[in-house]
Image (cartoon, grey):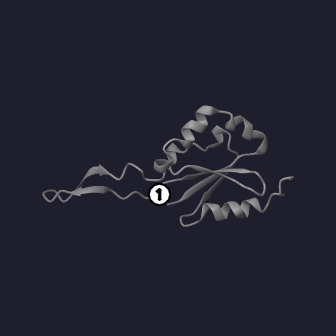
């Protein structure tokens, strides 16, 4: 399942982080959506991570008479969102969008991105 990761510019962070409705929507049903945030201890940067669902497999019951799969199983608690339902877009204030290929660890990618920035002042 591909992951989609975004980071905010420091000067734009306050605009989004103060928007209560964005925070509520982003963090609601995280088991279902797979959305979460990571704050770097080294730089203090915030990274918003959202798993984007890839190829869908149809789940359900096999009807022996028709040979077709019926039912709408597998829609709840997928741990990812459809690309069209992504909240982290340029329209919402995100400036750096990184789409990761399937199998890439978002946390490892964050470490590599974080290495490009200087340490925060203690």
Give the total of numbered labels. Answer: 1
> In percent of the image, x 23 and y 56: which residue is there?
61
Q: Of 121 and 59, which appears nearest the observer? A: 121
Q: Quadrant of residue 67?
A: bottom left
Q: Of 63 and 38, which appears nearest the observer? A: 38
> In percent of the image, x 68 and y 37: which residue is there?
16
Whole-percent x, y for residue 37 in the image: 62, 50
Residue 80 located left or right of residue 20: left
Q: Is residue 62 visible?
A: yes
Q: Of 95 and 7, which appears nearest the observer? A: 7
The secondary element bearing badge 1 is classed as loop
Note whether 35 is above or below 54 in the view shown: above
For this orientation, the residue located farthest to the right is 121
Q: Quadrant of residue 106?
A: bottom right
Near mark 1 (Cα within 10 A), the count class, few <14, some 14-19 or many ≥20, is some
> In percent of the image, x 54 and y 67: which residue is there?
103
Note whether 100 is above or below 85 in the view shown: below
For this orientation, the residue located farthest to the front is 122
Whole-percent x, y for residue 82 in the image: 48, 49
């Amino acid at each position: 399942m591909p992951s989609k990761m975004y980071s905010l510019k420091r000067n734009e962070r306050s605009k989004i982080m103060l928007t209560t409705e964005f925070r509520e929507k982003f963090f609601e049903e995280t088991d279902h959506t797979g959305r979460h945030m990571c704050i770097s201890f080294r730089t203090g940067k915030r990274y918003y991570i959202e798993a984007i669902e890839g190829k869908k497999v149809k789940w359900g019951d096999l009807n022996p008479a028709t040979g077709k799969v019926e039912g709408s199983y597998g829609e709840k608690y997928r741990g990812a969102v459809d690309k069209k339902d992504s909240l982290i877009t340029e329209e919402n204030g995100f400036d750096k969008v990184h789409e990761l290929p399937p199998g890439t660890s978002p946390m490892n990618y964050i470490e590599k991105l974080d290495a490009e920035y200087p340490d925060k002042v203690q």
